Amino acid sequence: MTSPKRLFLIDGMAQIYRAHFAMIKNPLITKD
C-alpha cells in the first residue's frame, strides 16, 4: 500500500534530515 500521502511524508522526512545535517555542517543561523 503505497499511498501518495505516505510517499510525501517519507520525502518530507528525507528533506528535513538533509536540511538538519546541512545545518550542522554549515550553520547559517549562528552567524554572529
Image: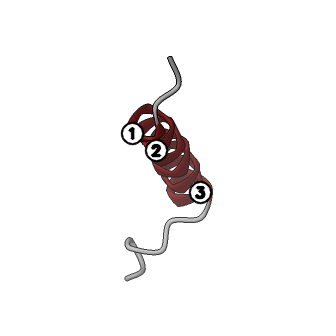
Asked if residue 4 lies left or right of residue 18, the reply is left
In three-dimensional space, the C-alpha distance between marks 2 and 3, rounded to whole angstroms, equals 21 Å
- The answer to whether the residue labelled 3 contacts the one labelled 1, judged by CB atoms less than 8 Å apart, is no
Asked if residue 29 lies left or right of residue 27, the reply is left
- Amino acid found under the numbered disc labelled 3: Ala
Q: Quadrant of residue 30?
A: bottom left
- Amino acid found under the numbered disc labelled 1: Lys
Residue that extends furthest to the top in the rendered view of this protein: 1
Tell how many labels. Answer: 3
Nearer the N terminus, badge 3 or badge 1? 1
Other-residue count near label 1 (Cα within 10 Å), few / some / many at <14 / 14–19 / ≥20 = few
Q: Position of residue 20 (x, y in %)?
A: 48, 49
Above or below, comparing residue 12 to residue 30 in the picture? above
Tell me the residue that label 1 is attached to. 5
Tell me the residue that label 3 is attached to. 22
Above or below, comparing residue 10 to residue 32 in the picture? above
Nearer to us of marks 2 and 3 is 2
In three-dimensional space, the C-alpha distance between marks 2 and 1, rounded to whole angstroms, equals 5 Å
Above or below, comparing residue 9 to residue 28 in the picture? above
- The answer to whether the residue labelled 2 contacts the one labelled 1, judged by CB atoms less than 8 Å apart, is yes
Tell me the residue that label 2 is attached to. 8
Nearer the N terminus, badge 2 or badge 3? 2
Determine the secondary structure under disc 2: helix
In three-dimensional space, the C-alpha distance between marks 3 and 1, rounded to whole angstroms, equals 25 Å
Q: Position of residue 3 (x, y in %)?
A: 46, 31
